[in-house]
Amino acid sequence: MRLIELSFVDGDRVQPLLKATLKTGPVDHRLSAPDDRGRRLLRLIFKDGDGQKALDAIQSIMEDEEDWRLVVLPVEATLPKIDETLDDATKKRRTTALREELYDDIAKGARLNADFLLLTALSTLVVVFGLSADNIAAVIGAMVIAPLLGPILAFSFASALGDLAMMIKAARTALAGLGVGLALSFAIGLVYEPNLMSDELMSRTVVGLDAPALALAAGAAAALSIATGLPAALVGVMVAVALLPPAASAGLLAGAGEWQLAGRALLLLTINVVAVNLAALLIYFYKGIRPRTWLERRSAKRSLYVNAGVWLVLIVALSALAVRLAALDGHSFTP
């Protein structure tokens, strides 16, 4: 459950606010009398997954006002107990997290700062030596600290909303993170000879149809966990597995002069990036994440179609290239 609190100056907006918000089906509501400063407090309680229509209505009514504040708070418990039984239609359209909640959470992952770069560098160091030493525990450990999930999901989320500013910010952060991984692993490859007998390292140079399938599943799981308000830590590890090891492998092998193997690892990385973004974008669309206004929705629809089309064309083309390379090498594509 969640509590929505709106603080605003008493005036002619009171009745329109009450009429609009009560239509959205709150479990309970309270409107306070004006205080000594002439301010009112409207409190609305909603079941999990509800409340988005109320937020949109409030913003539409209050967008021309200056002195107002809306706060969304989680409700741990309430008495008397509320019947949480849902009909089939409600279950199908339900999205646990509000758009504004998602935006605040996802926008944090698009930030490019020293902590993001340091975590990426540290995870790259761990994964490079873990790959070369054929140490799967070290590789998994690197995935836990790799912060690459944030900007990838932020880019897809911004694409679904048509938010160009966030798209640019997220793309810059993602490219910076992958760039750090590639550059640092390349520098290590110049002075450290990789172990070409390592299964963990060489498996990142074999590109099959299982690669886009894994990345699609990881991206879909990550976006779904975010959209439904569930912890994304474990699926974040899945996404990191799809991104950081092939990036580190490509840089390490390129630094050691193994350009053909590095190219294959880079192909795997590219397929994974495209697949994760495509899957996340489709999940956001499926969960009904849209902008509030009609004009924003039209822009977002165009952004969605363009991005989905580009990712789809890329994933088909890259997968076809992977099939061709594997056929030349005699590899099977059994996942």
Image (cartoon, helix red, strand yellow):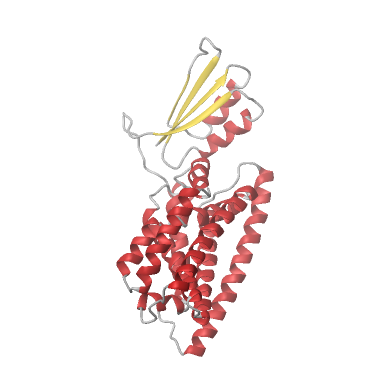
Q: Residue at x 48, y 34 (%)?
A: 25
Q: Nearer the viewer, residue 45 or 207?
A: 207
As drawn, the residue found furthest toward the top would be 36
* Spot occupied by residue 161 in the image (x, y as percentages of width and height): 60, 49
Q: Quadrant of the C terminus?
A: bottom left
* Spot occupied by residue 156 in the image (x, y as percentages of width and height): 55, 56
Q: Residue at x 40, y 53 (%)?
A: 232
Q: Is residue 249 visible?
A: no
From the viewer's perspective, is residue 12 above or below residue 54? above
Q: Nearer the viewer, residue 250 or 82?
A: 250
From the viewer's perspective, is residue 242 above or below residue 227? below
From the viewer's perspective, is residue 16 above or below residue 151? above
151 sits to left or right of 310: left
Q: Quadrant of the N terminus?
A: top left
As drawn, the residue found furthest toward the front would be 191
Q: Is residue 138 visible?
A: yes
User: Disc count in the image?
Assistant: 0
Q: Nearer the viewer, residue 313 or 193?
A: 193
From the viewer's perspective, is residue 274 above or below residue 91? below
Q: Residue at x 58, y 48 (%)?
A: 290
* Spot occupied by residue 221 in the image (x, y as percentages of width and height): 43, 59
116 sits to left or right of 156: left
* Spot occupied by residue 214 in the image (x, y as percentages of width and height): 44, 69
